[in-house]
Image (cartoon, rainbow, N blue to C red):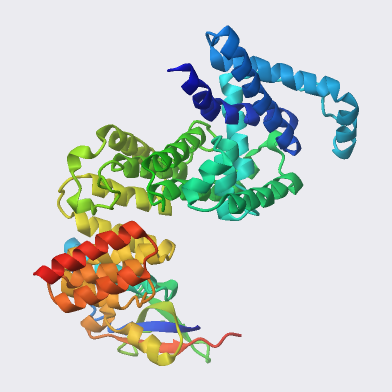
Amino acid sequence: MQQHELIPHLFRTEYSKIVAVLCHSFDLKHLEIAEDIASDTFLKAAETWGIKGVPENPAAWLYAVAKNKTKDYFRHNAVREKQVKETIRSNNVETEPDFEFTHQNIADSQLSMIFSVCDGDISPDAQICLALQILCGFSVEEIANAFLTNLATVKKRLQRARAVLRNGNFHIKTLVETEIKTRSDNVLKTLYLLFNEGYFSKTNNQLIRKDLCSEAIRLTSILVGNALTNTPQTNALLALMYFQSSRFDARTDEIGEVILLEDQDKSLWDNELIERGNHYLVNAFHGNEVSKYHLEAAIAYWHTTPTPERKWENILTLYNQLILIEYSPVTALNRTFAFAKVYGTEKGIQEAEKLHLNNSSPYHSLLGYLYANLDIDKSIDHYEQAIALTNSRIERQTLTKEVERLKRR
Amino acid sequence: MKEFLFVYRADYETYPSARKSPEEMQAITQKWMNWVAGIAAQGKLADRGNSLVPSGKVLKSNGSISDGPYTEIKESIMGYTLVKASSIEEATALANGCPILSVGGNVEIREIRAI
């Protein structure tokens, strides 16, 4: 790796670790101080490495500098620290926190940090922004790009979220089993949304999208790596992420248009990721629990198997269970698609028309798809409504092409 | 949105459950599952409800207890579901296609009066 690439790369991987370990060692109220120390550490690296060259173990060098800077901070701010101490109810805050950047401590700290950031009192959007910034080392610009929104919006979300963190009574140092239990639903939901933000993102930038997905996988893997959070649900979520990721390169074409599963070039599916998905899916079924992640992972599993018998029957059964656990328009539409695959287009249309999602673009494109071989006029009519309702330029292109194809028939 | 109770009734004597092969049982389960999920897909399922065990007891005002209720009335309650709808007409329309109808049973649709 070239030196000019090394620091950004390390920033991405090490910044969040340093912040997590520092927060873990001297509590969350000092988040901003931890971030300052981490930033200063990278500034020093940029200066020093430019002159003296890159050290043999850059990460260890960063850890050592961060640790010294922390010690300095606590020495030079002894007076201020005393004030901080007095504002914190427990008076046992050490003047110099004692910590090491061991593998175990980094993992524990990051786990605690995930649980701090995924706070149900913070809106889901803001949780994702905060996760990207604090847990993944994304800049505000990168977050804005990923969300296709402006800097001001992201900054506002982050400010509000940070205020909740500061005022909350969550103690990162003492992450205990009960807290893990009460918070883990929300943690998994945020990681799920983070992954989906990447996978179904509005942005066309493949790099950003892959980044979001791999960060979601990295964070979920931290949960699987700790005995307290290595639950069937977590394994199911990780399996789902791996199955979806395996199709990342196959699901869009070179101009970013989404390709339907059945039309995808299966040689582009990543078998290694499918294998990992299988591994975690097996782990997920230790025990009797069936969560929505189990069902979604199982559906994704059936999609990765090329042409098994009764594939769509199985997928429909899973969607039936999923819609009973949690209603969403997307699930309703996907279920109807599977229903049409099992019982034929005409029954599928009957089932679809009961949904009455008249203001939804995907609803009309499903009906357009189902009518294509039965009633071209109706099909075109639905596709045109789908075009009028969509906000995505790419989606509009794909649908317009389909309408043109139908008109030529 | 109001809530409505669907009460499924059929004649246990003619209800084709126990005498069926596993495959046929599976097909019946699949039908019910599709039907309930179809209501859920419309966002109109309040509670998927339950099915009832055939045997039961009836306690009367004179203190007598009998096995029942199917010994005295032909149709028994087989199960129930709670749905959401804006009117009794809409709720009744939702009951269309209920698998109980295909075995000669019926669906009674009643609005829930919140207490």
Front-lying residue, B8 or A385: A385
Front-lying residue, A356 or B43: A356
The residue at the point 70 percent across, 18 percent down is: A67
The residue at the point 33 percent across, 83 percent down is: B95
The x, y position of residue A153, in whole percent, is 60, 54
| Snapshot quadrant of residue A330 | bottom left
The x, y position of residue A249, in whole percent, is 28, 41
Is residue A72 depicted above or below A122 in this figure? Answer: above
Is residue A192 depicted above or below A76 in this figure? Answer: below
Q: Is residue A168 left or right of residue A294?
A: right
Q: Is residue A21 visible?
A: no
| Snapshot quadrant of residue A78 | top right
Is residue A368 depicted above or below A292 in this figure? Answer: below
The residue at the point 21 percent across, 57 percent down is: A312
Front-lying residue, A51 or A365: A51
The residue at the point 55 percent across, 52 percent down is: A150
Q: Is residue A53 visible?
A: yes
Q: For the view shown, which residue lies furthest in the front direction?
A: A51
| Figure disc tally | 0
The x, y position of residue A75, in whole percent, is 84, 20
Q: For the view shown, which residue lies furthest in the left direction?
A: A409
The x, y position of residue A197, in whole percent, is 45, 50
Q: Quadrant of the C terminus of chain B?
A: bottom right
Q: Is residue B115 left or right of residue A375?
A: right
